[in-house]
Amino acid sequence: MEQMNTRLTRSLWRSQRTRKKRYITGFDGLRTLAVIGVIVYHLAPSSMQGGYLGVPIFFLISGYLVTYLLIQEWETHGNVNFLSFYNRRVKRLYPALVTMILGTTAYITLFQRNLLVNIRGTVLTNLVYVYNWFEIHHGQSYFDRFSGESPFTHLWTLSIEGQFYLVWPVVVVGLLLLFRSRVKAAALLLAAAIASAIAMALLYDPNNLNRVYYGTDTRMFAILIGAAMAFIWPAYKLSGNVTRSHRLILDGLGLVSLLGTVILFFRMNGQAASTYKGGMFWFTMLAAVLVATVAHPGSDMNRLLTNKFFSYVGKRSYGIYLYQFPVMIFYESRVQNIGNHPLLNALIEVALIMVVTEASYRLIESPLRHYQYGQMFSDVRRLIRQPAAHRVTTALGGVAVLCFMLTAVGFVQQPAAAKPTALQKTITKRQAEAQKQNAAAAKKQKALAKAQAESKKKHDKAVAFSKLSKADQKTAKYYFLTADELSSSKQTPLTAIGDSVLLDDSGDLQKVFPGAVVDGQVGRQASAMPGVIASVNQRGQMAKNVLVNIGTNGNISQAQADQIVQGIGRDHQIFWVTAHVPTREWQNQVNTMIHKTAKKYSNVHVVDWYAEAKGHSSWFVSDHVHPNDHGNRYFTSLIAKTISKQLTK
């Protein structure tokens, strides 16, 4: 009888534990906010420069939920069923991931073969969840949005989560056995989170963000903070019966953390040093407060973040995250006027993402999450015998086989390395030529600066042109310049700093400005400019007149524009070229910022290439961004005319 009472008591205790398990609907709201941030960031980084912070929120929720469910299982059953845990994770994550990888690779094989570089490594590392480390060594920067983007780049987050799921049941059981005190276990996890954040700060390199952005060790702190919370703040142990004052405290903390999270979505620049030297860690701590208040049944935050829209998006957030990048990259490779109609194109892309996600959710994710894989062979035999009775399944199977075959073709045809385009060859050649001339040009700058003062307005146009050498007359005609404009340009010390558009024009620029020092780099963004400017100054190559061509590869914040102007110096004349990037949404934001900066600083002058080139598609190569030889004539001419006009005022 005593044994029966003991068993009955244990059964009641376990059933009480089980009844306390609840679905926290507000987490769907948090997932919705996170995925909206990521989507908007990828579509329009200038509109929400901190949208990438949705990823730490996903990590927080995963760390919290997985850990708290494992602890609850241990307390309810006295053990953790590892096989059941891994089975649930695989059935939840793998079907959609494999579908996305096969579908994307098949599309690349058929329509965008330039993306087949490293395709074998990309696919295989994603399937075993180590893609983030592959990206560190083979991938481009997460923030390089101009060209050659991989539709798989965003999958680095899934690799970190996969690594977490693999080891975490063992870690949680170890902590439960090692520590009687949940507080001590949480303290150990928090200490590990702090160590991860310190590693991010120490390994931060502005010239190579990949290591800290993709690294498991440098990004694990978000998951660890969520896991630490699960030990000391498990939802199933929190009571909804709280006093009015406690409810107000919980709601106040939740609202403040929600507001702070949204503000940082708009303000925390993903390329700023402060982001990696503590900024992302403190953002995650702020978001952890929000997660904690949503998890507490005595707070109103769960109700605030619960509605049909949030539930719909939250349940599909995994699929939305999976399919967003392939849809965006494939769409943007076909549509060339995105910069002129950013909102319309963004809405179209979001609609396409949702259609693909919904199809995947209904046809792949939901059915396979509950599928019993042990009956697979019998189901396949039944399908072969009666394909007409299972038309949808047969069609999906046919598509899967086709995608698999195309992926195999892509594997076989993977190029050894990316072949340089004609544009890349031209830029590389001109970069080498510019570097050869830089050393000699630097020596000429002092002499040119002296000659500049003596040459202003010496002759009228006719006399001046007649006195030009035949070579100079030919140059003036070729670049549509008057004699005075060419003479002024030839005697103007100039330092030009910029990106691949500047490199492409460097040969023409140095014909008109023989003393020009050109410092350009493919993919250069505004965040790199302070370091470049410091390097040019250190080499003693900063002339009194500075041409800035930055904005092709990403948006420019006011703080970055201020840094560029102040780094060059207020005693220099700065000529900033506007961006012609019709294929990217940040075009208008960049040009607005350049005009705004020129109004703010009297020594900054606009070279309005966007206004000059708009509507002249024949001036550009196939990417609609880099001028061809004909376009470079107009590009160089505009620069020379603008600088000459300003300096002769």
Image (cartoon, rainbow, N blue to C red):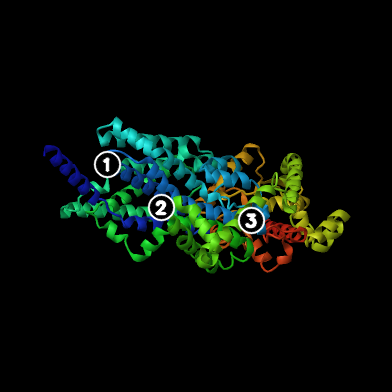
Residue found at the far left of this picture: 1
On the rendered structure, is 299 left or right of 43? left
User: Which of the image's four quarters has the N terminus?
Assistant: top left
Q: State the mark number for residue 146.
A: none
**Relative to 395, is 183 above or below?**
above
Disc 1 + disc 2, Cβ < 8 Å: no
- Give whichever of discs 1 and 2 has the lower sequence position: 1
Q: Using the image as rendered, state which of residue 452 and residue 606 is in the foreground.
A: 606
Residue tagged 2:
264
Q: Spatial distance from mark 1 to mark 3, Cα to Cα?
A: 48 Å
Residue of label 3? 108
* Element assignment for label 3: helix
Label 1 vs label 3, nearer the camera: 1
Tell me: 246 left or right of 89: left
Q: Secondary structure at mark 2?
A: helix
Q: How far, Cα to Cα, is label 3 from label 2?
A: 35 Å
